[in-house]
Structure formats: C-alpha cells, structure tokens
Image (tube, grey):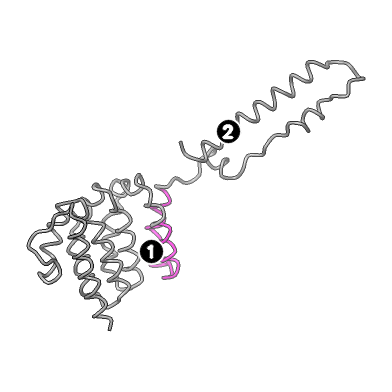
Amino acid sequence: MDPKLNDLFKWSIENSSNSTTSTSVTASHPTNESSTTTDSDAASAAPNRPVNADILEALLGGPSDADLMKESMAAILSPDITLSNKLVACDNFEQLIESLDNANNMEPLGLWTPLVDLLGNEEAELRTMAAWCVGTAVQNNAKSQERLLVLAGIPTLAKLSLEDPDERVRRKAIYALSSGIRNYQPGADAAVKALPLGMRIEDTLDARDMDAIDRVMDNLREASRQKAA
C-alpha cells in the first residue's frame, strides 16, 4: 500500500475510535451535572490527530508519479528552462525512476526516446545526467534493458564511454552500460559488437558472468582515466 494511503487509513481509524469514545462518555452521563467527566474532558483525554498535508494530497488526489515524470522530462526538453533548472529536473526524474514500477512506466509514457536522445545533447552536464538516468532505469530491470537495446542505446553508451571529451560523461556512460548488459544477454551481445577488441578481450561476453563484465568495465575506466591524463 502507498505509505500516504496507509497513513490515511490509520488516521481514519484513530479518529473514528476517538469519536466513538467521546460519544460513549456522553451517553453514560446524559444529564448528571455533578459528574466530573464532561465531553470536553473526553476530548482532552483522546485528542484527534490532525491529518497532515501529504495525507490530504493522497485523499484529494495530488500529482501522480507519472505526472511528475512527464513534467520533469518536459522541463528538461523545454528551450525556456535554464540549464541549472534542467539539471534539477533530471535529478528529480532519476529519483522517480529508482522505483521499478516508475521505470517500467517510461515506455507507455513515451519517455525512453527523449531520454536516449539526451545522450547526444550538446551540454555535457545533460549527457551526464541522461546516462545516470539510463543506468538507474535499467538496473536489474530486463524490461528497461530491452527498451535501451531497441533504441540503440548500447552502442551509444559504448561510444560515449570511449570517446566523449568529458570525463564525467564517460564515467556515467560506463555505469549505464554496465547496468544495461548485466544478466541481459542481448545487451551483452550488442556491447561486444560496439566495443573494440581491446576493451572486451574476447569475441563473446556472458551476461551472467559478473567477473567478465567487471573486467570489461575496468578496461573502459582505465581507458577513460588515460584519456583524462
């Protein structure tokens, strides 16, 4: 259950119980003016817990994660948004797709294509954030790994890992490439085709062999460090 809805459920039970208690006290002392227990006493003994803003949002219907994801991508792509605000939007988007459900919703929301396109953006910071988002979306997620493959994201990441002039982009591209091929053989096969022999060592790469994949990524990181030197 959504945490906000769970809190709402608890709140409704607590306040329903408090209301019942107050009513019971009143019924047991209908007209006895000498009684020391009054309705106000009962209310003081069992105060209602106010509902917080997050619970109200869940009750009244605030923006969904899908809405927030679309809004973030719209901000990233908007020519009217500053670079610093685009980076904030990228960060928000990355946090949203840490959820497996949200990552899987990227395809029906039409967000995969613009994200992969961002890997070719002229701004190095946006390429970096795009690679980071890709790596988050595909991590341990075969459905997202498939989308990355279909959109030719594997060769794009391989090229960025080796050739991008910005070291931050190369590092995040290596991270995304690593996440995109682990336990996903079609992605590993695409990486073998995209990487030069010196990086992949062999002509085949078993997607289930974590040590072999680590060696490939280590080779890419070393090449990146040498490029930065």
Which SS does the magenta portion mostly show?
A: helix
Outermost residue on the left side: it is: 203
Identity, as a three-letter code, of the amino acid under mark 2: Lys
Q: Residue at x 39, y 61 (%)?
A: 90
Residue 78, numbered circle: 1
User: In screen coordinates, is 82 left or right of 45?
Assistant: left
- What span is in magenta? 67-93
User: Is residue 64 placed above or below 78 in the rendered structure?
Assistant: above
Count the marks. Answer: 2
Q: Residue at x 30, y 75 (%)?
A: 167
Question: In the figure, residue 177 lies in which quadrant?
Answer: bottom left
Residue 86: percent from left, percent from top: 41, 65
Secondary structure of the residue carrying numbered label 1: loop
Outermost residue on the bottom side: it is: 229
Secondary structure of the residue carrying numbered label 2: helix
Give the mark toward the camera: 2 or 1.
Answer: 2
Asked if the magenta segment contains residue 137, the reply would be no
Asked if the magenta segment contains residue 85, the reply would be yes
Q: Residue at x 35, y 63 (%)?
A: 77
Residue designated by label 2: 10
User: In screen coordinates, is 136 left or right of 10?
Assistant: left
Residue 189: percent from left, percent from top: 12, 57
Identity, as a three-letter code, of the amino acid under mark 1: Ser
